[in-house]
Amino acid sequence: MFIKDWKECKEITAGDNTLLRELLNPNKENLKLRYSLAYAMVKSGEITLAHRLKSSEVYYILEGEGEMYIDDEKGKVTSGQAVYIPPDSIQRIKNVGENDLTFLCIVDPAWRPEVEEIIE
């Protein structure tokens, strides 16, 4: 059995400036998964840098309010919502609430540094 607590994962600042804790990644641990899973946070008033992944990605919003930007589209997101981000889409998310915006990032196939490009 494999159990991992997000609080025990090292917090890093991702290339897009999201505060990130990687929970599952088969490229880093001996897991039979196609996808990776990370816990992410954007502080109030902040926006991530525009970036794109070669992989598809899903954000599942845990807490907070945000604006999601995918290519030329913009939409409001809040807790309990999932956002599908197609491969090669330019994406960013802005925290428009007063509290931290927290969400899960699911990348399939699993995230690797070479699949991400920062636009700004």
Image: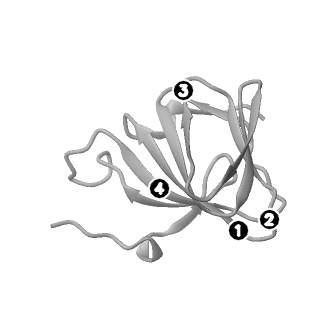
Q: Are marks 1 and 2 in contact (CB under 8 Å)?
A: yes
Separation of disc 1 and disc 2 at Cα? 6 Å
Separation of disc 3 and disc 2 at Cα? 26 Å
Badge nearest the viewer, 1 or 4: 1
Residue at 68 percent of width and 46 percent of height:
16
The residue wearing badge 2 is 44
Residue 100 got which mark?
1
- Amino acid type, callout 2: Ser
Pick the residue in front: 12 or 89: 89
Of helix, strand and loop, which one carries label 3? loop
The residue wearing badge 4 is 38
Mark 4 Cα-neighbour bin, 10 Å: few <14, some 14–19, many ≥20: some
Residue 108 locus on image (x, y percent): 39, 36
Q: Are marks 3 and 2 in contact (CB under 8 Å)?
A: no
Visible residue check, residue 111: no
Pick the residue in front: 11 or 103: 103
Of helix, strand and loop, which one carries label 2? loop
Nearest to N terminus: mark 2 or mark 4 = 4
- Amino acid type, callout 4: Ala
Residue 14 locus on image (x, y percent): 61, 52
Nearest to N terminus: mark 3 or mark 2 = 2
The residue wearing badge 3 is 86
Left or right for 17, reference 60: right
Residue at 50 percent of width and 31 percent of height:
115
Separation of disc 3 and disc 4 at Cα? 18 Å
Q: Does residue 99 sit above or below 18 in this rendering?
A: below
> Furthest residue to the right?
45
